[in-house]
Image (cartoon, grey):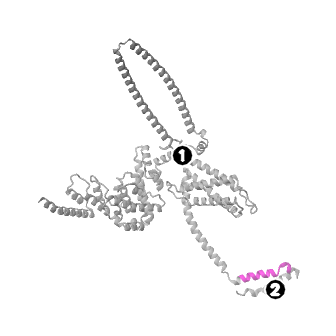
Amino acid sequence: ESSALGTAADPLQHAQRRRRMRAIQLAVKWNRPLVVEAIFKEQHNPKGEFTKSHQLALQYALELRRYDVIRLLMGYQGFSLQFVNLCKLYLVPNDGFLDSDEKLQKELLTNQGRIRDTTSPRRSYECFQDVIGIWLKNIDKAEGRPGVLSLSAFAETAPHFAHLFTWSVFLGEYSIADLFWRECDDPARVALLGSHQCLLIGNKMVTSKERLEEQAERYEQVAVDVINAADSQTDAFAVLEHKEGRFSLLDLALQLEMKRFLAHRHCQALLDRMWNGRHAGSSVELPENISMTALLWRATMPLTNPHYTAKARSLYQKKTQDEASKKARAGLKVERMLAIAKDAMRAARVEATNAMAAEPADLNESSVVRRKRFTDYAEKQRNHFTKFKARARGGVGAKLAQAADSAKKGFYQVPSVIFVLRFFMHCLFLVLYTYVLSYVDISKIPESYPALSDAEKVFHLWSLSIVLDDVASAIDADQTEATPPIKILRNVLMVVGVCARLETATRHAPVLYSMYQILLSLNVVFIAFALIEYRSYSKPIGVLYIVIQRMMQDLVIFMEVFLYIVVGFMLAFYGLYSGATPNEGAAADADAAADAFAPADLASSYGGTYGGEQLQRGARRGLRPLRGRRG
């Protein structure tokens, strides 16, 4: 009878759950959070867990973007995003940026079966990584960014508040986005990404660009407020240097060009410290206001470098102290050995005297005493060996600590030192370039030309090393910026010029030598321009360099438009000139012929000046019929 009652109760419970879920869906659809709360109170849930009904209600509230219901569900004990289907949220029509992206919509339609599969949360999240994660990476690449929006998609293993924040910003639901932002583990990073999202959407949605730019400024200010909330500069540095994936918070702000955030005093202080080597991974701390000349002198003259002189002095002092301590320990050991030997001899004499005076019964007792002494000695040795092992382990730990200290970045790995050395070496290369350019002589071609000199060999090797350095930087995984076209053109001209000159070293090729001279002359312009790029690292010139660089981009567009206008006028004038009437051309030819047939000296020889003028008029009258002839 009880089994029959249980069987009959199962359909009733199932029907009751279906009615409850239907009621929850209607309450969520009508945006009635109080009704939803009342339904969950009627549900038998003594432990207050976040049940399957709560999870389904959360998914439905997210799809309908019900702010009040979402906030209500987030207040329940045990709230979890584990069962949220993130891909399904992107399927909801929104009449905005997501619907306008054809690639995203195509991927969503292609993977619709995987998206609607709710059997496994892990499988649902993998679908989110394959579809939405790849799409986020592609839209960043289209904008020239290193895939910063997709970092959270691949860094986590389950749905996270940062994912819902990104989705809310794409939909323009900023109140819901703020709700999720408060729960994020790294609020400053998420705020910067939200600002980047708004600017990205504003470039595509021109009609709402102004509103999106205002929202981007608000999110950037939120990130600044997070840094302002730090109790000390040390805490702010810890937040700015915290890495998630490839980028720290400071690196992310640099990649996204968040100027207001980077202008914060803590960001500027941290950049200055990193520039001068004053950070955790460096063993050198340069002064704040050290000049480039002093830095170059220290880099090229290590004997005068305070860092190395102080290090050498400390090593010498340590070596002297070690030698003194060794001598002292050796003296103590000798004294101790002598004392032990004297004690042993004294003890031996005492024992020998006692043994000779003792009765035979006492011999067993003396052996017991000797065994006890040996046992005590063995115990002392064991204790001594234990202490020795502890000291040995301490020595190994000290060596490991010393190795860790030596693994820190040294003087020649400080960014400011690297910059000064590269700038100095580039100036030297430019001097060598000038010498080689002046050495080129094409006046003797095609008879002969100078042989390949030692200076040219050094120059060619140096040129190829510069090209290889640029190639290595371009393929570096940490490199986030694309190689400028001017640098690519410079490297191509350099390689072609070197190949042309090397070819002339094996055979007589005047054309290749002339091409080598032309390429050298053109490429020196780009080599000299690189000095401006080096100087852009200084604060006074850096801002001006960025302004000029942006201005040059606009200037290229203007030059393109101007070129079209020039080509148009050139073709128009060509048409006007080539379409002149034949009569005008024949008249001009007749006048020229008249002047040729009646020169002034010939006319004067046949009748003076007056006769010459008569002859010229007669020649023109004779050639006048030619002017009216056509064709």
Task: Give the magenta-colored segment's residue range.
Answer: 585-602
Q: Quadrant of residue 469?
A: bottom right
Q: Is 206 left, or right, of 412 in this rendering?
A: left
Q: Quadrant of residue 467?
A: bottom right
Q: Is 135 left, or right, of 305 in this rendering?
A: left
Residue 480: image location, x then y, percent: 50, 56
Q: Which residue is mark 1?
A: 413
Q: Which residue is mark 2?
A: 618
Residue 302: image location, x then y, percent: 60, 40
Q: Is 590 left, or right, of 236 in this rendering?
A: right
- Judge whether 590 appears above or below 192 on screen: below
Dot 1 crowding, Cα within 10 Å, few <14, some 14–19, many 20+: some
Residue lying at 51% horizontally and 25% vertically, measured from the top left: 330
Going by the numbered disc 2, the residue's amino acid type is Gly
Which SS type dominates the magenta stretch?
helix
Q: Nearer the viewer, residue 209 or 515?
A: 515
Look at discs 1 and 2 and give the one toward the viewer: 1
Residue 314: image location, x then y, percent: 54, 34
Q: Where the N terminus falls, by quadrant? A: bottom left
Q: Name the residue furthest left.
A: 1
Q: Nearer the viewer, residue 121 or 186?
A: 121
Residue 373: image location, x then y, percent: 38, 22
**Res. 92 visible in picture:** no
Secondary structure state at the residue bearing disc 2 = helix
